[in-house]
Image (cartoon, rainbow, N blue to C red):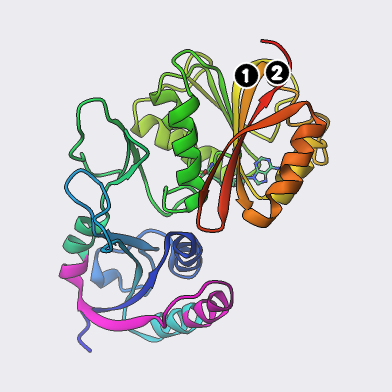
Amino acid sequence: MNADELVEIAVEVDGEAAEAVAELFNRFNGGDWVEDSAAGEASGGGAVLESTGYDDFGNPLDGEFRLVVKTYLKPGPRGRTIQKQIEEGLWRLRLLYPMPEPVARPVREEDWAHAWKRHYKPLRIGKRVLLAPAWEEPNALPGDVVVRLEPGMAFGTGLHPTTRLCVAALEKWVRPGDSVLDIGTGSGVLSIVAAKLGAHPVWATDIDPLAIRVAGENAELNGVSLGFDQLYVRHGSVPEDQEGQFSLIVSNILAEVLIGLFDAAYGNVPLAAPLAPGGRMILSGILEEKAGTVVAAAVRHGLLEVERLQEGDWVAITVQSEREA
Ligand code: SAH
């Protein structure tokens, strides 16, 4: 292999496994890519997501939707060690998600540097929301809500079905002027979508400090201003000082965590406390078989199911407060 060749490791996956594979690539081969090959270290680049099978407006073409997660290694002993770690990690992930064996092939470095960004395509969700990579100005239709994200940094590229279900529910329920609370914001994707649909203020919280940083950066990238009037990003979980303040709460975490949040297992305030009378809550990250236990927790707190969206094994449930608005 020539010194200017890289090893590309590619795995074809569905949206759900893509986040897990991207996280693995970022963990073992993350950090900034060293563009200058003279600097020579065999690491960096993280994960690259490619999706194909879309038309120019981000609509999936029938039967052609395909997602490939790739990472690139520099040649040399360190590159080989990272490759081995990645292959072991992928072997473990294959126990959880069905996916084919990774494909490794040499590629020329210049090809990598210039070509890969072309493949990360805008993704349309619901009727008007278009999620696009940070560097691209997508082909939007009049009335589209365009949200641009830096991929691969915090959870929430829009590739995971649980995120897509929340975006579809937000599109349905958010009215201009609604106050929205997004608990577990990750990349900030749902808060930014809500703000762009006209919600204000929007509060985003996350227990992960990295998510708080990335959410702030993604907000800025989208021209969503940080501060009480538009988007307020806060480290933590259910805010303790906002009783009855939000007309809509969205939370895409796991069923077990949501149930814990309802019962104030991780703090002093139950999930329903910041909800205004008559307000709605979008709950996601729920495997179909666990939907019943989440709805039961919601009912214990005076909320009734009004809608359920499903994609594969995942459901997102919208519940509404029984109290008069
Ligand atoms: N909202 C994004 C990210 C969802 S991932 C999307 O829909 O794509 C779930 C996020 O919840 C992670 O960023 C994680 O750090 C955060 N999280 C996990 N437990 C939490 C808790 N108890 N309170 C607040 N955030 C939590």
Residue 235 in percent (x, y) is at: 63, 34
Asked if residue 90 lies in the magenta stretch, the reply is yes
Kind of element beneath mark 1: strand
List the residue tagged with mark 2.
242
Q: Which mark is residue 17?
A: none
Name the spot of residue 247 as percent of width and height, x first. Answer: 60, 18
**Does the magenta portion include 269?**
no
Q: Quick one: SS at disc 2?
A: loop
Query: Total number of numbered labels?
Result: 2
Indicate left or right for 3 with 225 as reference: left
Depth order, front residue of 141/21:
141
Residue at mark 1: 246
* Residue 61 picture quarter: bottom left
Bin the neighbour count of mark 2 within 10 Å (Cα to Cα): few under 14, some 14-19, many 20 and up: few
57 vs 83: above or below? above
**As displayed, is residue 131 above or below residue 107?**
above
Question: What amino acid is labelled 1 in the image?
Answer: Phe
Rendering quarter of residue 62: bottom left
Q: Amino acid at mark 2?
A: Gln
Q: Quadrant of the C terminus?
A: top right
- Is residue 227 among what the camera can see? yes
Q: Is residue 309 above or below residue 319?
A: below
Identified at 44% across, 15% down, the residue is 176
Q: Is residue 188 shown to the viewer in this render?
A: no
